[in-house]
Amino acid sequence: MNIILWNCRGALNLDFKRRVMEILVNHFPVMLIITETRVGGVRAAKIIEELPFDGFFATDTIGYAGGLWLLWKKEEVEVFVLSATEQEIHATVKVCHLNLTWLISPIYASPRVNERRILWANLMQVAKLHNLPWLLLGDFNEVLCGEDKFGGRGVNLKRALDFKECLDSCNLIDLRFSGPKFTWSNSRQVPDLILERIDRCFANPNWRLLFPEASVTHLSRVFSDHCPVLLELSRPPPTDQNRPFRFQIMWIHHPEFPNIVKEAWELEANLNVAIKKFTESANHWNRSVFGNLFTRKRRVLARLYGVQKALAIGPSQFLVRLEKELAEEYLIIMQQEEEYWALKSRLNWAIYGNRNTSFFHVSTLVPCSSIWTAIKVGFPVFEKGICWNVGSNSNLKFWEDKWVKGYTVRELIEGPLNQHEAELSISDMFHLGSWCWDKISFDLLAVIREQIRAIPMQLFGDKEDTLAWKYSKDGLPFCFEVLEYASNHAGLYKFYAIGSA
């Protein structure tokens, strides 16, 4: 059983769900604790509904600050929330297959000292009210000693002693960790670099006896200035899946790939022989030059992990630069991985995003037909015709979804959006048959407004948003119509031949 703790620095980030899914796919947590979400209430519930957890509890935020979420899988654990404040959640956890019950307390300590002191007092009071095995974990925004910090001002001894007094009073011990020493970085150059260990896991002796082999790992810091913290109560058995060879659209982004295609087709007139030659060459090239995507991903993560451990021991300009380069390489690999899954799932991630996450992954188990393989190789052409028909109860995002002649409204404007504007849906903007332009803080150009007014809107009934393909007579993307359009506009005959093998 695994538990993940992560300070995400804002769940309204457009990449938040993608980043969470990346963590989940790699570590399979039964419980997920997310701190500093900066969103609560109904908006938090809507975001959480799209994550693969069927149980959750979210605290209120103070404006756009704070926020603490506890998520769990009901088939694995039964969680009963006892009490909560803006800085803490206290809940009992019953592990279904072990019939064990213990107390878990996720924490997001306020950056303000006076409010943290209130939290320390609350925790000492909770300790007096139970004798259960107790796990306390979260972002405490405080260090315990000088070893927990590098750079910046020295450790405030009074605040560190207050924190230690709280832990001693609660009879809590620090769970030792492996991985990079520090969990937070300000990501500056070495002269201004500050590193701290403020994301931690504590437990009382009863909990430690209950899970004597529990281990804490500081994972690589990629998506936030905080690293995710993995708490493993037991390690899952390793799995090894052999996947068949498939043409991957991500290869097209590699500068050497056109030569692989050229060599296979240029000197061979026989179609079957050319296809066989291309398949063998691409397979060899994928292993020796391009490299297995998931192996590359693990290798980059391992190097990033090692660099961040070295940074904690002796920071240098070289290590800071190398960490940045590896983080950028990891983001590129993630983009290629998204294209990989988009290809296998028969849907374009850019169109569906996180709307259909379960289908997006489950559908990868279905073998890809030859026609669909060919379409996806030329998918940039196919994608140009994709757009949304707006339903009467539309859930489409006003700025980010393609519903205005195959474009997003965001593509038609310049400049930043505030948090409220960025989350607007079409239903928020279109009310009782008219557009509510006063809900945005600036004036849209008249030509953009006219384009929006020209979109047919469903005013009555209960019709859902539907996908359409604007080059088809009835809006449906039939395979042969796509092939005909693509062949007329992109000259992709050779790729079709590969896909039809």
Image (cartoon, rainbow, N blue to C red):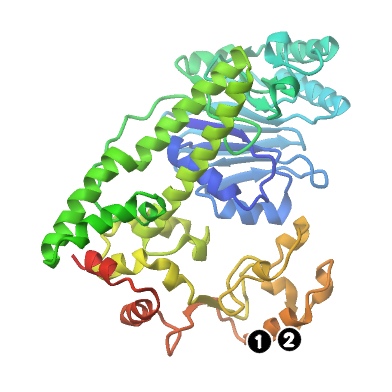
Q: Position of residue 403 (x, y in %)?
A: 59, 76
Q: Position of residue 20 (x, y in %)?
A: 54, 44
Q: Look at label 2 and name its amino acid.
A: Gly
Q: Which residue is mark 1?
A: 459
Instruction: Give the quarter of the image for residue 359.
Output: bottom left
Q: Which residue is mark 2?
A: 433
Instruction: Give the quarter of the image for residue 422.
Output: bottom right
Outermost residue on the right side: it is 114
Instruction: Give the quarter of the image for residue 323.
Output: top right
The answer to whether residue 455 is visible is yes
Image quarter of the N terminus: top left
Q: Position of residue 131 (x, y in %)?
A: 63, 18
Q: Is residue 501 above or below residue 419?
A: below
Q: Is residue 60 above or below residue 179?
A: below
* Nearer to the camera, 321 or 180: 321
* Nearer to the camera, 368 or 320: 320
- Mark 2 Cα within 10 Å, few/some/many (few <14, many 20+)? few
Image quarter of the C terminus: bottom left
Q: On the picture, is 130 further left or further right than 18?
A: right
Helix, strand or loop at mark 2: loop
Q: Position of residue 404 (x, y in %)?
A: 62, 78
The answer to whether residue 74 is visible is no
Label located before the other in sequence (2 or 1): 2
Question: Marks 1 and 2: in contact by CB < 8 Å?
Answer: yes
Outermost residue on the front side: it is 267
* Nearer to the camera, 235 or 193: 193
Helix, strand or loop at mark 1: loop
Q: Look at label 1 and name its amino acid.
A: Leu
Q: Residue at 52% across / 43% down in the picture?
A: 331
Q: Residue at 70% across / 56% down in the picture?
A: 42
- Mark 1 Cα within 10 Å, few/some/many (few <14, many 20+)? some
